Image (spheres, rainbow, N blue to C red):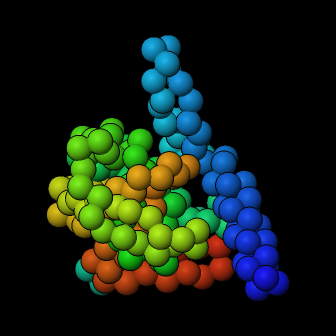
C-alpha cells in the first residue's frame, strides 16, 4: 500500500510540475465559432536561432526557457508548430490539435502503437512528416506519432534528433549540428 501511495504522489507532483512548466508556452483557447485553437506564446513564436557554419557543418544554438526546457518553432508542411525538445521521447509526438492543423485528423487515424510514458501507457498513431524545418535545418520524411491524449505542446523527439550530425547541452544552451 505504501509503495502505491508513494508512486501516486510522485506522479501527481510530476503532473503538476509538467503542467506549470509548459503552461506559459502554449494555451488552448476557443475561437469565435467555439472551436479549440492552439495559440503560441510570443516567447516561442518569436524565438530566433543563433546559426553558425564551421568546417562545412551547420549548427544552431538554442537558449533554454525560464523553466529550463528547450523549445523551437518548427515549420511542418507549411504550418508553424511549437515544440519542446525531448531527448527522452523516441519519436516526434504531435498533440491532437497540432496533428489536425497538419492534416492528420485524429478521428481517422489508427491508434495501433503503444508508448510508455511517465504517466503510463498511451495509444498512438504513427505518421510521417513530409518536411520539417527549423531555421536552416531541414529534414524530410520524419517519423512521428499522434497521441489521443491532449497535451500542451508537441514534442521534438529522437526521430528528428537522431538525423542530426549531433547535439549537446552546455548549461542553458543546446547546440544542434547537421
Q: What residue is shown at x 51% (from left), y 61% (from top)?
A: 84
Q: Is residue 30 above or below residue 73?
A: above
Residue 95 spot, x, y in % from top left: 43, 51
Residue 31 spot, x, y in % from top left: 50, 20
Q: Is residue 160 visible?
A: no
Query: In the shown orientation, is residue 7 left or right of residue 156?
Result: right
Residue 140 spot, x, y in % from top left: 18, 63
Quadrant into which the C terminus falls? bottom left
Q: Is residue 32 above or below residue 59?
A: above
Q: How many marks?
A: 0
Q: What residue is shown at x 59% (from left), y 39% (from top)?
A: 27
Residue 107 spot, x, y in % from top left: 29, 42
The extreme right residue here reads 2
Q: Nearer the viewer, residue 130 or 62?
A: 130
Q: What residue is shown at x 58% (from left), y 73% (from top)?
A: 118
Q: Quadrant of residue 57?
A: bottom left
The extreme front residue here reads 1
Q: Quadrant of residue 11?
A: bottom right
Quadrant into which the N terminus falls? bottom right
Q: Nearer the viewer, residue 104 or 141?
A: 104
Query: In the shown orientation, is residue 55 left or right of residue 152?
Result: left
Q: What residue is shown at x 32% (from left), y 80% (from top)?
A: 162
Q: Is residue 44 above or below residue 87?
A: above
Q: Nearer the viewer, residue 82 or 10?
A: 10
Q: Is residue 85 visible?
A: yes
Query: In the shown orientation, is residue 14 left or right of residue 58?
Result: right
The extreme top residue here reads 32
Query: In the shown orientation, is residue 19 left or right of residue 60?
Result: right
Q: Quadrant of residue 42?
A: top right
Amino acid at each position: 500500500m505504501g509503495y502505491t501511495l508513494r508512486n501516486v504522489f510522485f506522479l501527481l507532483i510530476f503532473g503538476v510540475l509538467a503542467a506549470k512548466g509548459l503552461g506559459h508556452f502554449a494555451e488552448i483557447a476557443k475561437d469565435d465559432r467555439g472551436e479549440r485553437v492552439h495559440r503560441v506564446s510570443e516567447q516561442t513564436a518569436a524565438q530566433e536561432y543563433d546559426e553558425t557554419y564551421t568546417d562545412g557543418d551547420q549548427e544552431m544554438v538554442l537558449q533554454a526557457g525560464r523553466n529550463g526546457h528547450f523549445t523551437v518553432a518548427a515549420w511542418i508542411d507549411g504550418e508553424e508548430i511549437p515544440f519542446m525538445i525531448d531527448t527522452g521521447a523516441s519519436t516526434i509526438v504531435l498533440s491532437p490539435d497540432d496533428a489536425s492543423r497538419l492534416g492528420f485528423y485524429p478521428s481517422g487515424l489508427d491508434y495501433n502503437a503503444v508508448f510508455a510514458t511517465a504517466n503510463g501507457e498511451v495509444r498512438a498513431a504513427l505518421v510521417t512528416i513530409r518536411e520539417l524545418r527549423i531555421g536552416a535545418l531541414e529534414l524530410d520524411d520524419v517519423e512521428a506519432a499522434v497521441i489521443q491524449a491532449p497535451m500542451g505542446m508537441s514534442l521534438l523527439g529522437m526521430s528528428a534528433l537522431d538525423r542530426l550530425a549531433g547535439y549537446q547541452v552546455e548549461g542553458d544552451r543546446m547546440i544542434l549540428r547537421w
